[in-house]
């Protein structure tokens, strides 16, 4: 089991920040694009090796992202239309992401088995998440998905405030 703290910088125009483990040591670095029509993120490990890339794709209704893992595995993350709680679909992986009523907690599961739990902290100026990955093989994937989901939430907040 691994635990991560994902905290974005409050004033970062491109979305650049580090992700720490339970000891506070940086284990991932996220670099976001600057002034691109569709946002992109690159996630690297503590040695600078690319872990994944996330690309926001054009979609008429709901946010959609193309994710490419370092292994070459590619999949699409799509926010589904729901009235009460957030739900995301991930094609090609057999994984399911479900959010709670308040849009602050998410669970990643496969075949009904919980793989990771993500909790967003309340009352923070910058997006801050605590992630608990129950199966270590999914750590890179979980960190990547949290970054994409947080960006969806930022886009929705900007649309609601604008």
Image (tube, helix red, strand yellow):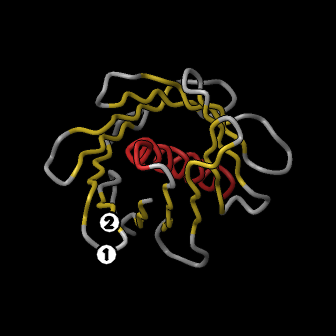
Q: Where is residue 124 in the image (x, y as percent from the top left)?
A: 53, 76
Classify the position of the C terminus by image quarter. bottom right
Q: Of the numbered discs in the image, which one, if any, rests on residue 23?
A: 1
Give coordinates of residue 78: x percent, y percent: 62, 31
- Pointer 2 residue: 20
The residue at the point 28 percent across, 54 percent down is 28
Q: In this view, does 31 lie above or below 132?
A: above
Q: Is residue 14 positioned above or below 96 on the image?
A: below
Where on the picture, by quarter, is residue 49?
A: top left
Tell me how many marks there are. 2
Q: Looking at the image, is 85 positioned above or below residue 131?
A: above
Callout 1–callout 2 Cβ contact below 8 Å: yes
**Disc sitting over residue 158 in the figure:** none
Residue drawn at x 59%, y 65% as measured from the top left = 119
What residue is shown at x 72% (from left), y 42% (from top)? 87
Q: In which quarter of the image is residue 34?
A: top left
Viewer-side label of 1, 2 = 1
Question: Residue 121: which quarter of the image?
Answer: bottom right
In the image, 76: left or right of 26?
right
- 67 or 24: which is nearer to us? 24
Q: Which residue lies furthest to the bottom in this view?
A: 123
- Furthest residue toward left: 47
| Left or right, residue 133 beside residue 44 | right
Residue at screen point 65% across, 24% down: 60
Mark 1 → mark 2, Cα distance in angstroms? 7 Å
Q: How crowded is mark 1: few (under 14 residues within 10 Å), some or many (20 or more)?
A: few
**Viewport quadrant of the N terminus:** bottom left
């Amino acid at each position: 089991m691994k635990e991560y703290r994902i905290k974005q910088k409050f004033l970062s125009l491109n979305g650049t920040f580090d992700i720490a483990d339970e000891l506070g040591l940086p284990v991932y670095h996220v670099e976001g694009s600057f002034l691109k029509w569709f946002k992109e993120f690159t996630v690297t490990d503590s040695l600078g090796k690319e872990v994944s890339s996330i690309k926001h794709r054009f979609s008429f209704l709901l946010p959609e992202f193309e994710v490419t893992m370092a292994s070459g595995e590619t999949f699409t993350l799509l926010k589904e239309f729901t009235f009460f709680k957030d739900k995301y679909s991930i094609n090609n992986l057999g994984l399911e992401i479900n959010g709670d009523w308040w849009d602050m907690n998410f669970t990643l599961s496969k075949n009904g088995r919980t793989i990771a739990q993500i909790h967003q902290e309340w009352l923070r100026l910058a997006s801050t998440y605590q992630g608990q990955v129950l199966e270590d093989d999914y750590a890179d994937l979980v960190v990547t998905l949290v970054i994409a989901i947080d960006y969806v939430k930022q886009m929705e907040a900007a649309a609601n405030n604008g």
